Image (cartoon, grey):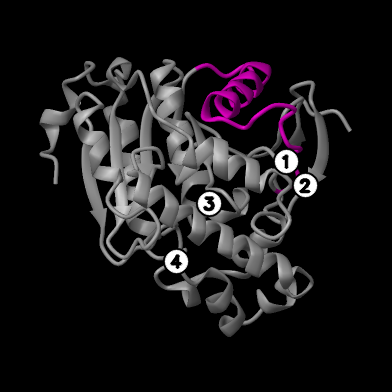
């Protein structure tokens, strides 16, 4: 099938929205309005944002890819550095005929969101627990934690879909990523099957995209940036607030009771941040921070 944009389509997913296959990624598209790009963390898929989609789809043109080597997207033919992942996302946005976008990202997806802002492709950014500014000891901790999660889920991959149907199973699958994993949906939990358990690019993305990544050029960002982190985040430790000194006008917002991937922990708080930050996109550069003090 060929989509109206001239792209091949895989049909419709559980949302009743289009699944687009471009040269780089599988994309889930829904809604209308200003474009909002959703970028998930390592080990998941676009379904990680399922708790937010009804509210976001009603207000924005939501563009949600599976990152390289995750879900339905093939792995990149080169090292999946932040630059390479951003290149691939940007190429797809160009093919979709989209210039600047609002971006909501989590973990490595938040790091890519910040890189898009460095390149002038973001109108606004909400970055939830972005990777990149961790110390050597924190990188070692994160590598061991995420690698262990990969090995554990890889071993039970055939059981994930069945486990995702029960509250006990979802709690076990998402423990450590969500602060309240029992609140998660079957869709969120089952995303781990083609993410942590089955993602072709997991190990290379963990190394090149997270453990070896050093952010640069952050002083060039001229759009509103909100840095958010769950107060019960056991993965990102204290790296999120460190971006404050490097990004002009950025502010930090704690997500009370949220974990590392807090989409189902505090969905309303995240949606409110998106609405607030997109509204600031018309504010003169570097002046938006004065509208609300940093926390």
State the separation of the CA atoms marked 2 and 4: 28 Å
Q: Earlier in the sequence, mark 3 or mark 1?
A: 1
How many numbered marks have been drawn onto this rendered protein structure? Answer: 4
Q: Earlier in the sequence, mark 2 or mark 4?
A: 2
Residue count near mark 2 (Cα–Cα under 10 Å), binned few <14, some 14–19, many ≥20: few
Q: Earlier in the sequence, mark 4 or mark 1?
A: 1
The residue where tag 4 is placed is 178
The residue where tag 2 is placed is 12
Magenta residues? 71-99
Tell me residue 288's x, y (percent): 19, 26
State the separation of the CA atoms marked 3 and 1: 14 Å
State the separation of the CA atoms marked 4 and 1: 28 Å
The residue where tag 1 is placed is 18
Q: Which circle, 3 or 4, is nearer the viewer?
A: 4
Is 245 in front, or is 65? 245
Q: Earlier in the sequence, mark 3 or mark 4?
A: 3
For the residues labelled 2 and 1, say whether their Cβ atoms are less than 8 Å apart: yes
State the separation of the CA atoms marked 2 and 3: 15 Å
State the separation of the CA atoms marked 3 and 4: 17 Å
The residue where tag 3 is placed is 53
Picture quadrant of residue 119: top left
Q: Residue at x 41, y 59 (%)?
A: 262
Q: Earlier in the sequence, mark 2 or mark 1?
A: 2
For the residues labelled 2 and 3, say whether their Cβ atoms are less than 8 Å apart: no
Question: Dot 3: what SS?
Answer: helix
Residue 57 visible within the image: yes
């Amino acid at each position: 099938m060929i989509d109206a944009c001239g792209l091949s389509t895989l049909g419709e997913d559980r949302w009743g929205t289009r699944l687009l296959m471009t040269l780089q990624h599988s994309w889930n598209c829904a809604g209308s309005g200003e474009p909002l790009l959703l970028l998930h963390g390592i080990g998941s898929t676009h379904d990680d944002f399922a708790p937010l989609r009804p509210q976001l789809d009603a207000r924005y043109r939501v563009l949600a890819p599976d990152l390289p080597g995750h879900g339905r997207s093939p792995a990149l033919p080169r090292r999946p550095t932040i630059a390479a992942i951003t290149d691939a996302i940007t190429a797809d946005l160009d093919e979709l005929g989209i210039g600047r976008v609002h971006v909501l990202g989590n973990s490595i997806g938040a790091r890519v969101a910040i890189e898009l802002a460095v390149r002038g492709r973001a109108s606004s950014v909400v970055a939830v627990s972005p990777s990149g500014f961790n110390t050597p000891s924190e990188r070692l901790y994160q590598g061991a934690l995420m690698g262990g999660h990969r090995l554990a889920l890889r071993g039970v991959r055939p059981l994930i879909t069945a486990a995702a149907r029960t509250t006990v199973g979802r709690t076990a699958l998402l423990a450590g990523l969500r602060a309240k994993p029992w609140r998660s949906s079957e869709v969120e939990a089952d995303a781990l099957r083609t993410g942590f358990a089955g993602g072709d690019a997991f190990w290379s993305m963990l190394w090149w995209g997270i453990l070896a990544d050093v952010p640069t050029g952050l002083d060039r960002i001229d759009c509103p940036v909100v840095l958010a982190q769950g107060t019960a985040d056991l993965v990102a430790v204290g790296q999120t607030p460190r971006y404050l000194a490097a990004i002009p006008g950025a502010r930090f917002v704690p997500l009370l009771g949220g974990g590392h991937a807090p989409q189902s922990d505090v969905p309303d708080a995240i949606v409110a941040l998106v609405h607030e930050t997109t509204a600031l996109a018309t504010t003169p550069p570097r002046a938006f921070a004065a509208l609300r003090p940093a926390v």
